Amino acid sequence: MNGSITLFLADAIADERGVLAAPGAILARWNDPWPSVDIIAAGDPKRVGDHDEANRATVCELPGCLITPGFVNAHAHLDLTSVGPRPFGRGAEFAHWLADIRQRRPQTETAIRESVRLGVERSLQGGVVAIGDIAGAWSVIPIDELRNSPLKGISFFEVFGLGEATEAVSRLDDMLPSVDLDVNGVRFGVQPHAPYSAGIRLYERANSLNREQGLALCTHLGESIAESDLIVRREGPIRSFLESLGLWTNEAAGDFGQAPTSVAHCERILQGAPWLVAHVNDCSDDDLQRLRATGASLAYCPRASAYFGHERDFGPHRYRDMVASGIPVALGTDSVVGLPPAESDRLSVLDEMRFLWRRDGADPTMLLGMATTNGAAALGLPPDDFRLSLGATAGLVAIPMAEKWDSDPLEAALESDEAPKLLRDESGSRLTATQGRH
Ligand SMILES: [Zn+2]
């Protein structure tokens, strides 16, 4: 209910600055539309409880839970949600996988709409309140669905085209005048798919759309060995795939074989606009410097990288080196296709945080920053809306913590497997941590 006030009492509260109070309380006024709130007070429960507005608040107790701001999923493909998880065995080919997904992706308007709707539901179940979603299949339905949902962020319209990419450029130019660029907190952006499926001319057109109309830009970059085989050496399974589609022309081939890595291949493009690049599993020391110098943000999708086995090819992902060198690194889930089936009932960067905490022992506060303020900055949203500071906040999430914890409550929330809960106004009903459990 708009304007009503809730006092949340939890074991701890935390944001990208770390654990702010344990136990912790947040006094919040509900905004319209859900899930946004105005934080009136946050911190020590006694102090927050003494606030003038606290005596007319509904009390919501969340024992065993940590409260954080709502999450940002910086890279997702909601229109692939209905495809579901698919296996990718050791030795499988990335190019064959791409061909398989091309066939399985929803094709009709109704099927695309249903798939995005399912993705929105699973995002909300994962505590996600903002998203960088890739709208594939030349359809504006995904942006329409996002604008009718509680999620904020960007819908990146995905385009393909090698060489002069005349058809892609003219389809984009024909379509743009009829598209609203910013509605209900969801902006229209453009994503040239990847440097092996979009030529330099298409990337240049994207840069000019950023300069002329302020469109946000995203691309996949440095994802696979198959990609670098094509870009560096003009060979490999992606070349065979393009040949089988009749897309490997002299003109298309002319773009490739000029740069030592995928990042170097795109360096001049990345200098031309603020890009969000997804993956960059393939990142040399020189690439790290190139990325930093261009000012690009990165969307790292840890479970997707592990699913494809990219770390076997390229070594550990360099997200911590990137963060240390000042590259803004956000977290993404990529599509549901690459998620373990048991984890596919929600689409949450919390699960990416938990994955990195368990695999790498990554710093929990850094991870929370990647899942909130870094993602917000990468999507052009106000980072302050993803902190527990006073004023407008994009949403609040309660994360059940591991049963036993005695040191860091944020670590305890990452130890747990329990589902997060995006908080809503439930005046009168007393929430408990058990409601978040299976
Ligand atoms: Zn992707």
Image (cartoon, rainbow, N blue to C red):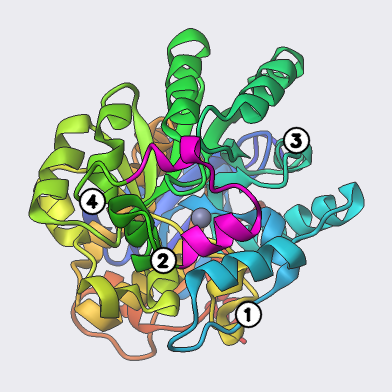
Look at 43% across and 12% down and name the residue there.
Answer: 211
Look at 10% across and 42% down and name the residue there.
Answer: 289
Camera-near label (2 vs 4) is 2
Find disc 4 in the rendering and name its residue: 261
Graded by Cα atoms within 10 Å as few (under 14), some (14 to 19) or many (20 or more), the crowding at tag 4 reads many
> Nearest the camera: 203 or 27?
203
Report the quarter where the C terminus lies. Answer: bottom right
N-terminal label among 1 and 2: 1
- Label 2 is placed on what type of residue? Gly
Report the quarter where the N terminus lies. Answer: top right
**Image mark for residue 140:** 3
Find disc 2 in the rendering and name its residue: 236
N-terminal label among 2 and 4: 2
Look at 53% across and 67% down and name the residue there.
Answer: 95
Magenta stretch prevailing secondary structure: helix
Residue 246 lies in the magenta stretch: yes
